Protein backbone atom coordinates (compact mmCIF):
# COMPACT_ATOMS: atom_id res chain seq x y z
CA UNK A 1 0.00 0.00 0.00
CA UNK A 2 1.40 3.39 -1.00
CA UNK A 3 0.62 5.55 2.05
CA UNK A 4 1.59 9.26 2.22
CA UNK A 5 4.30 9.64 4.85
CA UNK A 6 2.31 12.27 6.73
CA UNK A 7 -0.57 9.84 7.30
CA UNK A 8 1.48 6.72 8.03
CA UNK A 9 1.64 5.12 11.45
CA UNK A 10 4.83 3.08 11.03
CA UNK A 11 4.07 0.90 14.06
CA UNK A 12 1.20 -0.68 12.15
CA UNK A 13 2.16 0.14 8.56
CA UNK A 14 -1.29 1.67 8.22
CA UNK A 15 -2.63 5.14 7.54
CA UNK A 16 -4.56 7.10 10.12
CA UNK A 17 -7.32 7.76 7.59
CA UNK A 18 -8.05 8.12 3.90
CA UNK A 19 -7.22 11.69 2.89
CA UNK A 20 -10.06 11.94 0.35
CA UNK A 21 -12.71 13.11 2.83
CA UNK A 22 -11.98 11.66 6.23
CA UNK A 23 -14.06 14.22 8.17
CA UNK A 24 -17.16 13.46 6.09
CA UNK A 25 -16.46 9.76 6.57
CA UNK A 26 -16.24 10.18 10.35
CA UNK A 27 -19.46 12.18 10.41
CA UNK A 28 -21.29 9.50 8.44
CA UNK A 29 -19.95 6.35 10.05
CA UNK A 30 -19.66 7.43 13.68
CA UNK A 31 -21.72 10.57 14.28
CA UNK A 32 -24.50 10.04 11.75
CA UNK A 33 -25.03 6.29 12.09
CA UNK A 34 -25.12 6.57 15.89
CA UNK A 35 -27.42 9.65 15.78
CA UNK A 36 -25.06 11.54 18.09
CA UNK A 37 -26.40 15.03 17.33
CA UNK A 38 -30.03 13.96 17.65
CA UNK A 39 -29.28 12.39 21.02
CA UNK A 40 -27.48 15.49 22.27
CA UNK A 41 -30.44 17.59 21.10
CA UNK A 42 -32.65 15.35 23.25
CA UNK A 43 -30.58 16.46 26.25
CA UNK A 44 -30.99 20.10 25.20
CA UNK A 45 -34.76 19.68 24.97
CA UNK A 46 -34.78 17.99 28.37
CA UNK A 47 -32.90 20.94 29.84
CA UNK A 48 -35.45 23.39 28.44
CA UNK A 49 -38.42 21.41 29.66
CA UNK A 50 -37.14 20.42 33.08
CA UNK A 51 -34.60 23.13 34.04
CA UNK A 52 -31.78 20.64 34.63
CA UNK A 53 -28.86 22.17 36.51
CA UNK A 54 -25.24 21.87 35.44
CA UNK A 55 -23.39 19.09 37.22
CA UNK A 56 -26.14 16.47 37.03
CA UNK A 57 -25.74 13.32 34.96
CA UNK A 58 -28.75 14.22 32.83
CA UNK A 59 -26.94 17.05 31.09
CA UNK A 60 -23.94 14.92 30.16
CA UNK A 61 -23.29 12.89 27.03
CA UNK A 62 -20.44 10.44 27.49
CA UNK A 63 -18.41 9.18 24.54
CA UNK A 64 -15.66 6.57 24.54
CA UNK A 65 -13.14 6.10 21.75
CA UNK A 66 -10.57 3.42 21.05
CA UNK A 67 -7.70 4.97 19.10
CA UNK A 68 -7.31 8.76 19.27
CA UNK A 69 -4.56 9.03 16.62
CA UNK A 70 -4.48 12.61 15.29
CA UNK A 71 -7.95 13.41 16.65
CA UNK A 72 -9.96 13.16 13.45
CA UNK A 73 -13.14 11.92 15.17
CA UNK A 74 -12.98 14.64 17.82
CA UNK A 75 -12.59 17.20 15.02
CA UNK A 76 -15.60 15.75 13.18
CA UNK A 77 -17.68 15.77 16.36
CA UNK A 78 -16.89 19.39 17.20
CA UNK A 79 -17.58 20.45 13.63
CA UNK A 80 -20.97 18.71 13.87
CA UNK A 81 -22.02 20.45 17.07
CA UNK A 82 -23.21 23.52 15.17
CA UNK A 83 -26.33 21.44 14.49
CA UNK A 84 -27.10 21.25 18.21
CA UNK A 85 -29.74 23.70 19.39
CA UNK A 86 -28.36 26.52 21.53
CA UNK A 87 -29.01 25.74 25.17
CA UNK A 88 -29.15 27.99 28.21
CA UNK A 89 -28.19 25.15 30.54
CA UNK A 90 -24.74 23.85 29.50
CA UNK A 91 -24.54 20.37 28.02
CA UNK A 92 -21.28 18.59 28.84
CA UNK A 93 -19.71 16.09 26.46
CA UNK A 94 -17.15 13.87 28.14
CA UNK A 95 -14.89 12.49 25.40
CA UNK A 96 -12.79 9.67 26.81
CA UNK A 97 -10.22 8.29 24.42
CA UNK A 98 -7.05 6.23 24.53
CA UNK A 99 -3.78 6.22 22.63
CA UNK A 100 -0.92 3.83 23.30
CA UNK A 101 1.51 5.79 21.13
CA UNK A 102 0.46 9.46 21.11
CA UNK A 103 2.01 11.69 18.49
CA UNK A 104 3.31 15.24 19.07
CA UNK A 105 0.86 18.14 18.81
CA UNK A 106 2.85 19.55 15.89
CA UNK A 107 2.20 16.39 13.89
CA UNK A 108 -1.47 16.36 14.88
CA UNK A 109 -1.72 19.87 13.45
CA UNK A 110 0.08 18.91 10.24
CA UNK A 111 -2.15 15.88 9.70
CA UNK A 112 -5.40 17.72 10.39
CA UNK A 113 -4.27 20.63 8.23
CA UNK A 114 -5.18 18.61 5.14
CA UNK A 115 -8.75 19.77 5.90
CA UNK A 116 -7.90 23.43 6.53
CA UNK A 117 -9.14 24.61 3.13
CA UNK A 118 -12.61 24.68 4.67
CA UNK A 119 -12.99 27.81 6.78
CA UNK A 120 -15.16 26.37 9.54
CA UNK A 121 -13.12 23.17 9.82
CA UNK A 122 -9.94 25.24 9.99
CA UNK A 123 -11.13 26.94 13.18
CA UNK A 124 -12.12 23.57 14.66
CA UNK A 125 -8.64 22.22 13.94
CA UNK A 126 -7.29 25.03 16.09
CA UNK A 127 -9.70 24.03 18.89
CA UNK A 128 -8.50 20.41 18.83
CA UNK A 129 -4.81 21.26 18.58
CA UNK A 130 -5.04 23.86 21.36
CA UNK A 131 -6.55 21.28 23.71
CA UNK A 132 -4.23 18.43 22.72
CA UNK A 133 -1.11 20.58 23.04
CA UNK A 134 -1.86 21.07 26.76
CA UNK A 135 -1.54 17.33 27.43
CA UNK A 136 1.76 15.86 28.58
CA UNK A 137 1.78 12.88 26.23
CA UNK A 138 5.04 11.60 27.73
CA UNK A 139 3.25 10.78 31.00
CA UNK A 140 1.14 7.58 31.03
CA UNK A 141 -2.35 7.59 32.43
CA UNK A 142 -5.33 9.96 32.27
CA UNK A 143 -5.17 13.60 31.20
CA UNK A 144 -8.14 15.98 31.05
CA UNK A 145 -8.48 19.30 29.24
CA UNK A 146 -11.42 21.38 28.06
CA UNK A 147 -11.63 21.95 24.32
CA UNK A 148 -11.83 25.74 23.78
CA UNK A 149 -14.13 27.65 21.49
CA UNK A 150 -16.93 25.12 21.02
CA UNK A 151 -19.77 27.52 21.90
CA UNK A 152 -23.54 27.11 21.75
CA UNK A 153 -23.79 26.13 25.39
CA UNK A 154 -21.74 22.97 24.77
CA UNK A 155 -18.72 22.05 26.90
CA UNK A 156 -16.38 19.37 25.51
CA UNK A 157 -13.92 17.73 27.88
CA UNK A 158 -11.12 15.79 26.20
CA UNK A 159 -10.02 13.00 28.53
CA UNK A 160 -7.05 11.28 26.90
CA UNK A 161 -5.63 8.13 28.46
CA UNK A 162 -2.04 7.47 27.44
CA UNK A 163 -1.56 3.73 27.64
CA UNK A 164 -3.28 0.42 27.00
CA UNK A 165 -6.93 0.51 25.92
CA UNK A 166 -8.11 -2.03 28.48
CA UNK A 167 -6.72 0.12 31.28
CA UNK A 168 -8.68 3.13 30.03
CA UNK A 169 -11.93 1.24 29.57
CA UNK A 170 -11.77 -0.39 33.00
CA UNK A 171 -10.94 2.96 34.64
CA UNK A 172 -14.20 4.60 33.51
CA UNK A 173 -16.47 5.45 36.42
CA UNK A 174 -19.66 5.63 34.34
CA UNK A 175 -20.92 3.84 31.22
CA UNK A 176 -20.70 5.55 27.84
CA UNK A 177 -23.65 6.54 25.66
CA UNK A 178 -21.56 5.96 22.52
CA UNK A 179 -18.31 4.29 21.54
CA UNK A 180 -16.21 5.17 18.50
CA UNK A 181 -14.12 2.11 17.65
CA UNK A 182 -11.43 3.69 15.49
CA UNK A 183 -8.25 1.70 15.93
CA UNK A 184 -6.16 0.66 12.96
CA UNK A 185 -7.49 -2.14 10.77
CA UNK A 186 -7.87 -5.52 12.52
CA UNK A 187 -5.13 -7.12 10.43
CA UNK A 188 -2.62 -4.41 11.37
CA UNK A 189 -3.64 -3.92 15.02
CA UNK A 190 -5.56 -6.98 16.26
CA UNK A 191 -5.13 -6.05 19.95
CA UNK A 192 -7.54 -3.10 19.71
CA UNK A 193 -10.22 -5.48 18.38
CA UNK A 194 -9.63 -8.42 20.73
CA UNK A 195 -12.77 -10.01 22.25
CA UNK A 196 -11.85 -9.29 25.88
CA UNK A 197 -11.45 -5.58 25.14
CA UNK A 198 -14.76 -5.38 23.27
CA UNK A 199 -16.37 -7.29 26.14
CA UNK A 200 -15.08 -4.59 28.52
CA UNK A 201 -16.55 -1.95 26.18
CA UNK A 202 -19.91 -3.70 26.55
CA UNK A 203 -19.64 -3.57 30.33
CA UNK A 204 -18.98 0.17 30.06
CA UNK A 205 -21.94 0.97 27.78
CA UNK A 206 -25.33 2.17 28.96
CA UNK A 207 -28.49 0.40 27.86
CA UNK A 208 -29.31 1.59 24.35
CA UNK A 209 -25.80 2.94 23.88
CA UNK A 210 -24.01 2.53 20.57
CA UNK A 211 -20.71 1.34 19.16
CA UNK A 212 -19.64 2.30 15.64
CA UNK A 213 -16.75 1.07 13.54
CA UNK A 214 -15.34 1.37 10.04
CA UNK A 215 -14.60 -2.35 9.86
CA UNK A 216 -17.29 -4.98 9.27
CA UNK A 217 -14.92 -7.91 9.89
CA UNK A 218 -16.78 -11.01 11.02
CA UNK A 219 -14.75 -11.59 14.18
CA UNK A 220 -15.40 -7.98 15.28
CA UNK A 221 -19.14 -8.40 14.72
CA UNK A 222 -19.12 -11.65 16.71
CA UNK A 223 -17.12 -10.13 19.56
CA UNK A 224 -19.49 -7.16 19.83
CA UNK A 225 -22.51 -9.50 19.77
CA UNK A 226 -20.95 -11.57 22.56
CA UNK A 227 -20.42 -8.32 24.50
CA UNK A 228 -24.17 -7.58 24.44
CA UNK A 229 -24.59 -5.50 21.28
CA UNK A 230 -27.15 -6.00 18.54
CA UNK A 231 -24.91 -5.61 15.51
CA UNK A 232 -25.88 -4.49 12.01
CA UNK A 233 -24.13 -3.45 8.85
CA UNK A 234 -25.10 0.12 7.97
CA UNK A 235 -24.22 2.71 5.34
CA UNK A 236 -20.54 3.45 4.88
CA UNK A 237 -19.02 6.41 3.07
CA UNK A 238 -17.28 6.89 -0.27
CA UNK A 239 -15.59 3.70 -1.38
CA UNK A 240 -16.52 1.97 1.87
CA UNK A 241 -20.07 0.80 1.27
CA UNK A 242 -20.69 -0.70 4.70
CA UNK A 243 -19.83 0.14 8.29
CA UNK A 244 -20.77 -1.30 11.66
CA UNK A 245 -23.37 -0.16 14.20
CA UNK A 246 -23.90 -1.92 17.50
CA UNK A 247 -26.68 -1.10 19.96
CA UNK A 248 -26.25 -2.33 23.52
CA UNK A 249 -29.19 -4.50 24.58
CA UNK A 250 -27.84 -6.75 27.34
Image (spheres, grey):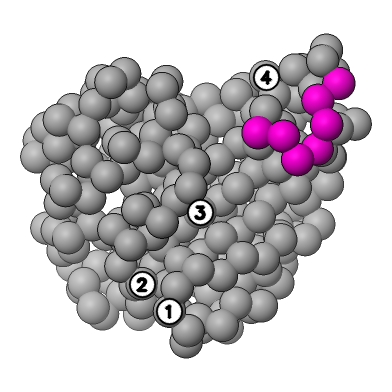
Query: Which badge, 2 or 4, is on the more N-terminal residue?
Result: 4
- The label nearer to you, 1 versus 4, is 1
Question: Could you say which disc has been placed on residue 96 in the image?
Answer: 3
CA–CA distance between discs 1 and 2?
A: 6 Å
Image quadrant in which the N terminus is located? bottom left
- In whole angstroms, how far apart are the C-alphas of marks 2 and 3? 13 Å
Displayed quadrant of residue 211: top left
The disc, 1 or 3, on the residue closer to the chain's N-terminal end is: 3
Quadrant of residue 222 within the rendered picture:
top left
**Horizontal and vertical percent for residue 130?**
70, 72
Q: Is residue 157 above or below residue 99?
A: above
Q: Quadrant of the C terminus?
A: top left
Q: Which residue is mark 1?
A: 140
Mark 1: few, some, or many residues within 10 Å (few <14, many ≥20)? Answer: some
CA distance separating discs 3 and 4: 21 Å
Whether the residues at callouts 3 and 4 have beta carbons within 8 Å, the answer is no
Nearer to me, 69 or 242: 69
Q: What are the residue bounds of the magenta stretch?
A: 51-57
Between 78 and 15, the residue placed more toward the observer is: 78
Bin the neighbour count of mark 2 within 10 Å (Cα to Cα): few under 14, some 14-19, many 20 and up: some
Horizontal side of 96 relative to 87 (left or right) equals: left
Residue lying at the far top in this picture: please name it. 49
Residue 150: assigned label: none
Does any portion of residue 237 appear in the rendered image?
Answer: no
Find disc 4 in the rendering and name its residue: 42
Q: Secondary structure at mark 2?
A: loop
Q: Decide: few, some or many residues near mark 4? Use Cα within 10 Å; few <14, some 14-19, many ≥20.
A: some
Q: Which residue is mark 2?
A: 163
Give whichever of discs 2 and 3 has the lower sequence position: 3
Amino acid sequence: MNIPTLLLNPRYNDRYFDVVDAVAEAKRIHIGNARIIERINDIVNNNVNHSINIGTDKNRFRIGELGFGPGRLLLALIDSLDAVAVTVEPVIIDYNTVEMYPIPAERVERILSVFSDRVRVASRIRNVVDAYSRIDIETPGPHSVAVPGVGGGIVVNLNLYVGEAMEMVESLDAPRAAWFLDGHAPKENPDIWRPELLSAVGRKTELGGTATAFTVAGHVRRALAAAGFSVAKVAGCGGKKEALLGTFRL
